[in-house]
Image: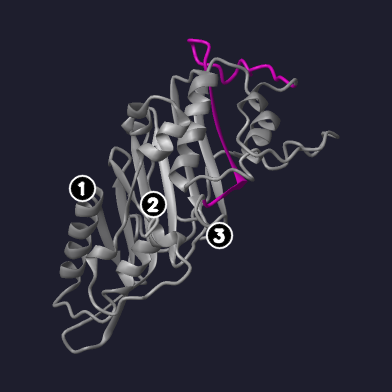
Amino acid sequence: MSIHGILGEQTTDYPTEYSPETLYPIARSMGRDAIGWQDDKLAVGVDWWQAFEISWLNPQGISQVAIARFSIPASSPFIVESKSLKLYLNSINFTEFASWNDVQALIAKDLSACLQTDVQVALFRLNDDLDGNGTALLIAQPEGVCIDEALAGNTDKVALTEHPDTSLLSASEAIEASSESMVNDGTQPYTFYSNLLRSNCPVTNQPDWGTLAVSITTDKLFNNANMLRYILSFRQHNGFHEQCVEQIFADLSQYYQPSELMVRAWYTRRGGIDINPCRVSDISLLPKPSRLIRQ
């Protein structure tokens, strides 16, 4: 097995019996060391994993199906390799459980042991209310302004870069901060999103697509076109979902010196699982989990 577990293997055996040993942890330090920023500031937030292929047997031997949400603290020393999680979930397909609560408790126990943290697990029936607001599985919409057309009037071609380029945040264009939205201390809040986040899996080199959302309060001039260029510079970058979000959080923190910052991403589903990291400058800024139309 490689350092990345079964994700990098050519062939895979799918277990048909309960197999918690299938779960494979990956140290967060691998990604954070590459970022080279303050680990403690990258450890404030949550990774929400949403799994849509959960199944087990009830005492009558009838298959049960559910949707699951796993909440993993950003302070955990490990993340779980996505393919190993899929295989683990498949391993309970033919395992009998007396109740839904038993399934939920077992998954929470196994994930918590693997990641050495307290993983919160919630199981939902297909018509359950996921967020407590009576919206069930309705699709959410990111808040703020979509910046995907910010370069529409620009004639310069956007280059493909091998690695994220923070210098693009300070490109030539600049905009004056609006006095109407300026806070008393000279800072200004910005809330925006882009559907154009793309990176590559560092093991398989498969593309990962996601929607990125940012809320930031800063006294520096902010430009949507520059931010879009920066997001596009991730297109050929190899990094796990969590690492990409933490890289963006670190870069924006260092360049804009914000008083408040929230960076989150909703990645599209692979193998029945989507991954949604979120990092905040203060835990009070943590939003609710949600899912978008591409998920």
State the image coordinates of residue 61 (x, y, percent, origin top left): 22, 88
- Classify residue 123 as left or right of residue 251: left
The residue that mark 1 highlights is 118
Q: From the top left corner, tell me how far across and down residue 156 is, in percent.
A: 83, 33
Q: Are marks 1 and 3 in contact (CB under 8 Å)?
A: no
- Tell me the residue at 35%/69% (across/down): 87
The x, y position of residue 69, in whole percent, is 33, 58
Is the residue under label 2 in contact with that under label 1 (CB below 8 Å)?
no
**Residue 39 falls in image quadrant:** top left
Amino acid beneath label 1: Asp
Answer whether residue 196 is visible to the viewer in this image: yes
Q: What residue is shown with label 3?
A: 294
Say how the picture is coloured.
Answer: one colour
Counting other residues with Cα less than 10 Å from the Cα at mark 1, is it few (<14), some (14-19), or many (20 or more)? some
Q: Which mark is residue 223?
A: none
Q: CA distance from mark 1 to mark 2?
A: 24 Å
Helix, strand or loop under label 1: loop
Q: Which residue is mark 2?
A: 3
Q: Is residue 6 left or right of residue 185?
A: left
Please identify, in this view, whether the residue under mark 1 or under mark 2 is nearer the observer: 2
- Label 3 and label 2: CA atoms lie apart by 31 Å
Mark 3 or 2, closer to the camera: 2
Q: Is residue 130 above or below residue 168?
A: below
Q: Residue 66, can we see it?
A: no
* Disc 3 secondary structure class: loop
Label whose residue precedes the other's in the sequence (1 or 2): 2
Spatial separation of the CA atoms under disc 1 and disc 3: 29 Å
Q: Amino acid at mark 2?
A: Ile
The range drawn in magenta is 173-201
**Residue visible at 37% across and 47% down in the picture:** 47
Point out residue 119 in the picture as x, y percentages from the top left corner.
24, 51
Q: Amino acid at mark 3?
A: Arg
